[in-house]
Amino acid sequence: MGVTTRFHRAASTGNVLLLKEATRWEVNTPDENLLTPVLLAATNGQALALSVLLKRGGDLTKTDRSGSAALHLAAAAGHRECVECLLKAGVNVFEMNTSGRTALDVAKLHREFEVVEVLEQFEADLCAKDSARVEQLRKRAAKQYEKLKQRYGTVIALNLGDSFRALEEHTALEESV
């Protein structure tokens, strides 16, 4: 696993000056939770830091343990500026996390309506401009989703198993009282 570096901390807090020193490798290095500086900047709403990281070679395809990419994380937290930055950088808006959700789905789930509006407008514009490109992006997203399921599927199953065991224990405790 990776370790938390000064660039991870800088991305979380928006320390742009430090991020300008980062190499491509450093901006894509995961910490122990598989979060790269790019993912941390998106999660924490640090749009300027995110922009710097992308210019330094930040990889838009990196994901956290749930298969959420930077766009998913920014959308879930309602960080409109980060979402717009990622869309301008060319992120695939149709990418899915391990739950099969796109960033738009995640924004709706978290009731981040401002971000929902941005993503819906982007998708509508993309569909109106180039339907062949949309089909290509959807196919690429489907392939990536299959890879994510293979990579993280057992981890998710184990986590769900732990949750179900905890629920069963809790239920057993309530019944015994």
Image: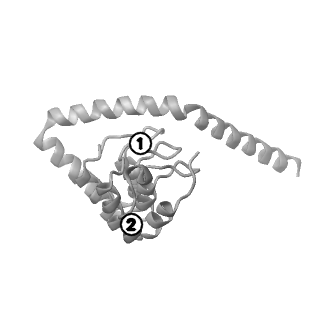
Q: Residue at x 38, y 47 (%)?
A: 105
Q: How is the image coloured?
A: one colour
Give the percent coordinates (x, y) of residue 70. Answer: 39, 52
**Circles 1 and 2: CB atoms closer than 8 Å:** no
Q: Looking at the image, is mark 1 or mark 2 nearer the viewer?
A: 2
The outermost residue toward the left is 129
Q: Earlier in the sequence, mark 1 or mark 2?
A: 2
Residue 176 on image: x %, y % = 88, 47
Q: Amino acid at mark 1?
A: Arg
Report whether 130 appears left or right of 67.
left
Percent position of residue 44, x then y: 44, 64
Mark 1–mark 2 Cα distance, whole angstroms, equals 23 Å
Q: Few, some or many C-alpha atoms within 10 Å of disc 1 (few <14, some 14-19, many ≥20)?
A: some
Which numbered circle lies on residue 112? none
The residue beneath circle 1 is 101
In the image shown, does 99 or 7 lie closer to the viewer? 7
- Label 1 secondary element: loop
- Residue 46's disc is 2
Up the image or down, 37 lies above or below 93; here it is below
Total marks shown come to 2
Under mark 2, the amino acid is: Gln
Residue 108 showing in the rendered view: no
Residue at 73%, 45% (x, y): give it: 167
Residue in the picture at 53% in, 48% down:
34
Label 2, secondary structure: give it.
loop
Of the 4 image quadrants, the one containing the N terminus is top right
Tell me the quarter of the picture where residue 95 sits.
top left
Q: Position of residue 99 (x, y in %)?
A: 48, 39
Mark 2 nearby-residue class (10 Å; few <14, some 14–19, many ≥20): many
> In the picture provided, is 59 more to the left or to the right than 64?
left
Residue 23 shows in the view: yes
